[in-house]
Image (cartoon, grey):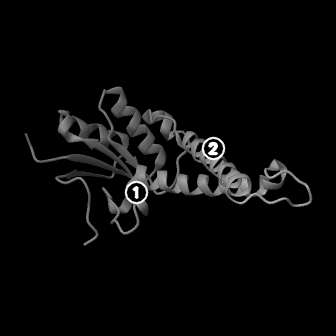
Amino acid sequence: MSDIKYILGLFEDPDEMLHGIDKLQENNIGIYDVYTPMPIHGIENKLGVKRSRLDIVAFICGITGTFTGFGMIYYMMAVDWPMNIGGKPNFAIPDFIPITFELTVLFCAFGMVSAFFFRTHLFPGRAPRVMELRASADRFVIAIDAKKGFDSQKIDELLKEAGAIEIKHNDRKYVSYE
């Protein structure tokens, strides 16, 4: 068994990269990830990436903000310090809708940012993990996990047939900036 962890196929054109993905999938070779310098429409479906559950996180955070807002207002105005202002009830719901709305938006925004940082491991102060530095500039990269038992010669041939301009065999997962 070799020390190669990942095989990277570098492409100049997104269409050639998509053709390379098709060739690899036709031969039942699993793709670890694809790195592109720009968004490519429909690549998630081609790779079988599951739909994001970020909308569920947003809903839960928003509902939490709504209940926190109503709970806070109820506690302040009806339990802790009830005041009689012009004969109005202590807990007049229409008066507190703006505060509740703002807390809903605040909780949703902070929850989404926190979920994003948690899911992508991009916490502030952490060095980014990059497999190929040119993937953010001008290259389209297909990464294949070489530890899965695939024949590296066959993968190299398939990538060359698809139009890869360069094929790299990485012995580590991420490239450092140093």
Front in this rendered view, residue 88 or 38: 88
40 displayed left or right of 67 = left
Question: Is residue 138 visible to us here?
Answer: no
Classify mark 2: helix, strand or loop.
helix
Whether pointer 2 and pointer 1 mark residues with C-beta atoms closer than 8 Å, the reply is no
Q: Residue at x 36, y 27 (%)?
A: 26
Residue type of the residue flagged with mark 2 = Ile
Query: Horizontal and vertical percent for residue 78?
Result: 73, 52
Q: Which residue is mark 1?
A: 139
Query: Horizontal and vertical percent for residue 73?
Result: 70, 54
Q: Residue at x 63, y 44 (%)?
A: 63
Classify mark 1: helix, strand or loop.
loop
Going by the picture, which residue comes out furthest to the bottom? 178
Residue 13 vertical placement versus 136 (above, below): above
Query: Horizontal and vertical percent for residue 21?
Result: 39, 37
Quarter of the image where one finds residue 138: bottom left
Q: Which residue is mark 2?
A: 63
Disc nearer the start of the sequence (2/1): 2
Query: Horizontal and vertical percent for residue 98?
Result: 78, 57
Category of crowding for the residue at label 1, using alpha-carbon neighbours closer than 10 angstroms: few (below 14), some (14–19), many (at least 20): many
Residue 48 vertical placement versus 71 (above, below): above
User: What whole-number distance in Å separates the C-alpha atoms at marks 2 and 1?
Assistant: 42 Å
1 displayed left or right of 163 = left
